[in-house]
Amino acid sequence: MSNYPQLFRVRQTFERPVAPDIPGEVERQLAGLQLQERVQPGERVAITAGSRGIANIQFITRAIVEHVKSLGGQPFIVPAMGSHGGGTAEGQRALIEAYGITEEFCGCPILASMETVVVCQAEEGFPVHFDRHAFEADHVIVCGRVKPHTGFVGEIESGLMKMMLIGLGKHHGAKIYHRAIMNHSFGQILRSVAREVIARCRILCGVAIVENAYDETALIEAVRPLEFITREPELLKLARAWLPRLPFKTADILLIDEIGKNISGTGMDTNVIGRKYNDHVAAADEWPKIKRIGVRGLTAATHGNATGLGIAEFCRSQVVRAMDVNITRINCLTGGHPTAAMLPLDYETDREMLDAMLPTIGLTEPPDARVMWIRNTLDVAEVECSTAYFAAAQERADLQIVIPPRALPLDEAGNLARVK
């Protein structure tokens, strides 16, 4: 008898709102704001591009560029991602180009710099930084995905206001804001900085994106700056309702094929894995509750940034080799989460990693272990599950068994393939 659990595959059914005609929807939303009343021919308009792997982001960005051109404006794109990309202009430009946001595709310049302007002092006594290229523009359009933050809870989490705070604050701003959050609440700092930026930095509008559980564009909405603070909480409620989830609330082991900054700010979305407040254990009222996490690889788009690896207890040795230590440490230290850069126990093969993990889950015998295996935390529509869940899965109307139980698919070298 194998000393590993058998696996079966389930397909989850989530609510699936989808925005039709992405470029057309961007144009319709922006046209509804009548920006021609504010943008004069020849004026320069900065458009933000962040570091997340947002579905259709290259098409959304190009559609914003085209709308600005239709107004007679001169659009350009600025990377807005705090310290990501190793905290360098070249690294940040490379990140957005990897998402298809290039000068050729979007039809406008990309102006990447880590230089900022200190526009004022916040009420709390720290400087408010803003990307120099964006500050020197006549207008700024903030584009970003609204979703639950991986480390904070509030009416406003990740979205347009955070983009103005961390994204356009660049490395200098991100460092000081994350320090300030240690003394004040995330919500207070967010509102304080956003208020100053809206008042002083010529924010034209926001383009908010909400995704569904299948990593698809569910909603695009253009928002006036003074409405950011009231509309973002409403969009966040939708994003939270549409967030992907694992099919079961408890697990002994979660295997993840890949983590990366294009997947989540913490490499793996803590809202999905249940470790938003603590790296290695779920809070009392937090779900799911997972005893051990094993990471098998990094995404290509993360460019070696292994932020979040420290949340896992185990990993393949290939993850450590692919990790850019400097980039990862810069990002984690800037974000005030140094433990996210710490190294788990690493093993050359999946077999060795599982052999180390299974004895740490308690009295459960390895064949009976509750194991889930996913590609990444954005892609959980189909999940490999151990047979400990099989009876429960058969009773769930929202789960379809697409592959029946079979032996753990380890190859001769002792490795698994990726979840397809």
Image (tube, helix red, strand yellow):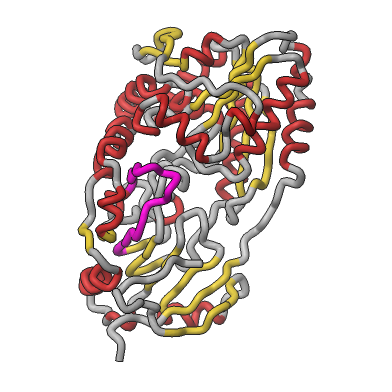
Q: Is residue 244 left or right of residue 138?
A: left
Q: Is residue 107 above or below residue 273?
A: above
Front position in the image: 176 or 184: 176
Whether residue 281 is visible to the viewer of this picture, yes or no, is yes
**Which segment is the magenta one?**
291-308
Residue 295 among magenta residues:
yes
Residue at the extreme bottom = 1
Q: Residue at x 54, y 56 (%)?
A: 244
Residue at the extreme front = 104
Q: Is residue 134 left or right of residue 323?
A: right
Quadrant for the N terminus in the image = bottom left
Whether residue 150 is visible to the viewer of this picture, yes or no, is no
Number of numbered discs on residues? 0
Residue 287 among magenta residues:
no
Q: Residue at x 43, y 10 (%)?
A: 117
Quadrant of the rendered image containing residue 185: top left
Quadrant of the rendered image containing residue 145: top right
Q: Is residue 373 above or below residue 93?
A: below
x and y, in percent, of residue 233 in the image: 58, 35
Q: Is residue 317 above or below residue 325?
A: below
Front position in the image: 15 or 140: 140
x and y, in percent, of residue 124 in the image: 37, 15
x and y, in percent, of residue 10 in the image: 54, 73
x and y, in percent, of residue 297 in the image: 36, 56
Q: Residue at x 33, y 33 (%)?
A: 335
Q: Residue at x 61, y 47 (%)?
A: 211
Q: Is residue 233 left or right of residue 259?
A: right
